[in-house]
Image (cartoon, rainbow, N blue to C red):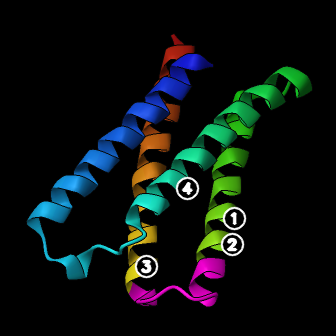
Amino acid sequence: MTKGLIRITVFSLFLVFVQYVAAQIVSVDLLHPYLLWILVFFWVVSLGMHVLSHVAHDALDMDMTLILLAGVTGRLLIAIIAMVTVALFGVENKSLFIINFAAVYLFYLVFEISSVLSNLRSNLK
């Protein structure tokens, strides 16, 4: 379990570094001021879903593939609820917030899918 937590944390720190570099290079109009908080939100959600999936696997004795798919679905629902809640309750420049939120979600989704695929490949051998 700790290997996955370390991978999520390293990936999140990489995204924070990319955000910092992008803030220095690109126009301020492309990055929302809450982008760092969006990254922290997804880091916490990813850590929580990772721990929850391992607890569910140990407690329920289910196939890990089903648990990981449930984790992807859970993260999607949590992200939609959080994005709509923040957008409705007073964030400035809502369209930029939604675009940045969706972009970070897609980065974490690609990371999660690549992690799951590498995990499944190692289990097939």
Pointer 4: residues within 10 angstroms few (<14), some, or many (20+)?
few
Could you tell which of marks 1 and 3 lies nearer the N-terminus? 1
Tell me which amino acid carries mark 2.
Ile
Residue type at tag 1: Leu
Alpha-carbon span between mark 3 and mark 2? 14 Å
Closer to viewer: mark 1 or mark 4:
4
In which image quadrant can residue 57 be found? top right
Mark 4 or mark 3, earlier in chain:
4
Mark in front: 3 vs 2: 3
Q: Which mark is residue 41?
A: 4
Residue 77 numbered tag: 1
Q: Quadrant of the N terminus?
A: top right
User: Of the residues shown, which amino acid type is indicated by label 4?
Assistant: Phe
Mark 4 and mark 3: Cα distance apart in space: 13 Å
Along the line of sight, the residue nearer the viewer: 56 or 9: 9
Picture layout, residue 102 above or below residue 85:
above
